[in-house]
Image (tube, rainbow, N blue to C red):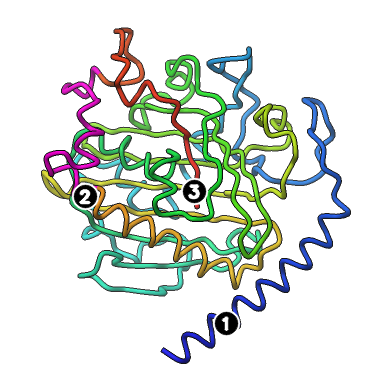
Amino acid sequence: MKLRVIISAALLARAAAVQKVCARQSRYNPSFIPRRHHQVIAAFGNPKYYSNNFIRADKDGAELKVPKFDVFFDELQKVSPLVKQAIHEENPGGIAAIDDADDVYKWKNMERHPNRLISQVDKIDNFQNHGVPMIRVRSSLRGPSKQRGIYFSELISTTDLRHKWDATNNIVETIYNAADLDDIKRFQGDKYGEPVMFGVGYVKTKQSVVSPREQMTLCGVQNFPSGASFVWGVELEEDQNHLFPKDQTKRMPRSTSHLFAMTMIPTGEETFDVEYVLQLDVGGLPGWLLGPVVTETVKKMFRFAEKYCESGFEEGGELAKRLAAFPDDEEESSLRTDEPIDEACVLDENRALLMPP
């Protein structure tokens, strides 16, 4: 315990020093709102994941950039075995069916506790030379199967739920959704299940060991006939900076989700496995410090998720109330339906589409 306290103090002290350096650098980085054709000056979103195709957004006459789904989802399959299972297997086996020897990349195992809530934590240092680690966390949970992909994604994408486990979050909101998910279906084809969400989310953090950060991320949710689902996300490129919320005029240092996926695989009527994969760059925070911070944040989400998912079986439970807002037939609750949706339906709310911690 004493050693742990000493290490924590050392980490905080070094983080404070990093914050001072970042503050000095930010004085030389003018705040401005880039216009649509402003010259790109730095790389946030990875251009290899983006096409030159656009779809209509749901408001303001905006257009949303479309990823190269084959390229992006191929990379997700390389870092997440559960994404690969979701896409290719009619009856995916979940965590128990994973053979880590089949990993495309070389991961370093940080934790392995098969009988605990957090069963495994792995990382790749400096993945794709971004200077920050890729983190992979696995867990097994119990919760209702109804709209599992949607309600689990809400843990990170709705303000009320996010604030219950993430003390650093200030704003998490949807900026734009796709006007018509059929547009996304045409680009994806039939290989990647059913797109049930697609849009742009905005996140701003509070002051912590570093100054406030912001993100603007393209995200979506894919559902599959097996009951599997995965949430995906990738940072937008600078040529999309005109999509920043109009009420957030002061630009903050930018955090970047280089790659993100959270996959849910059913393992029984009431049980499912989750694999959370994220490479996050918090603008100036060194990788050696960022890895433990991201890992602990994801663990906090799973600790909250355990109780939240169980509440779906309790009369009057928080999740049970949430699920009651969905139609009983999951097909009727799809965002693709032309039928009117009851005003109380969760799908009618202004829900954010991301964002990873």
Residue 321 on image: x %, y %: 22, 34
* Amino acid carrying mark 2 in the image: Phe
Q: Residue furthest right?
A: 28
Residue annotated with mark 3 = 356
Seen in the picture, residue 33 relative to 84 is either above or below; the reply is above
Residue at 46%, 85% (x, y): give it: 4
Horizontal side of 341 relative to 9 (left or right) equals: left
Q: Secondary structure at mark 3?
A: loop
Q: Choose between 267 and 323: the one closer to the eye.
A: 323
Q: What is the span of residues highlighted in magenta in the rendered image? A: 309-332
Quick one: label 3 or label 1, which is nearer the N terminus? Answer: 1
Residue 311 within the segment the image draws in magenta: yes
Give the CA separation, mark 3 to mark 1.
26 Å
Residue 309 on image: x %, y %: 23, 47
Mark 2: few/some/many CA within 10 Å (<14, 14-19, 20+): many
Q: Quadrant of residue 146?
A: top left
Give the CA separation, mark 2 to mark 1.
37 Å
Residue 209 on image: x %, y %: 63, 65
Residue annotated with mark 1 = 9
What mark, if any, has residue 272 been given in the picture?
Answer: 2
Q: Secondary structure at mark 2?
A: strand
Residue 303 on image: x %, y %: 31, 59
